[in-house]
Image (cartoon, rainbow, N blue to C red):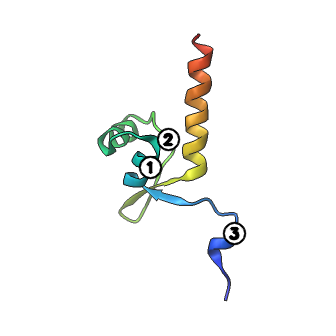
Amino acid sequence: MTDHTAGNDPELLTITEAADLLRAPVATLRYWRHLGTGPRSFRLGRRVLYRTDDLHAWIAQQHAQALDRR
């Protein structure tokens, strides 16, 4: 039997867990998803999921844009 948790697959987070990581309300993530401006997400069945590496990449992108505006 193989251990899938030991691989290099990025961790998947629910919208609530992603909101906690971003310190933003779940409603904000839903709104960003509707606008297409937030972090990359996808549906798996009925659930909306986020990859941790996508969240961290989005945070870095937002940080870089903020620095460029200075």
| Mark 2: amino acid | Pro
Distance of label 3 from label 2 (alpha carbons): 23 Å
- Residue that label 1 marks: 18
Front disc: 1 or 2: 1
Q: Quadrant of the C terminus?
A: top right
Query: Residue 32 at x, y = what percent?
Result: 39, 36
Distance of label 1 from label 2 (alpha carbons): 9 Å
Splitting the image into 4 quarters, where does residue 67 fall?
top right
Q: Could you say whether the residue bearing mark 1 is in a helix, strand or loop?
A: helix
Where residue 7 is drawn, which disc sits there? 3
Asked if residue 25 lies left or right of residue 12, the reply is left
- Which residue is found at the position 52% from the left and 60% from the top? 12
- Which residue is found at the position 45% from the left and 41% from the top? 22
| Mark 3: amino acid | Gly
Query: Residue 20 at x, y = what percent?
Result: 41, 48
Splitting the image into 4 quarters, where does residue 29 fall?
top left
Residue 6 vertical placement versus 56 (above, below)? below
Q: Could you say whether the residue bearing mark 2 is in a helix, strand or loop?
A: loop
Where residue 39 is drawn, which disc sits there? 2
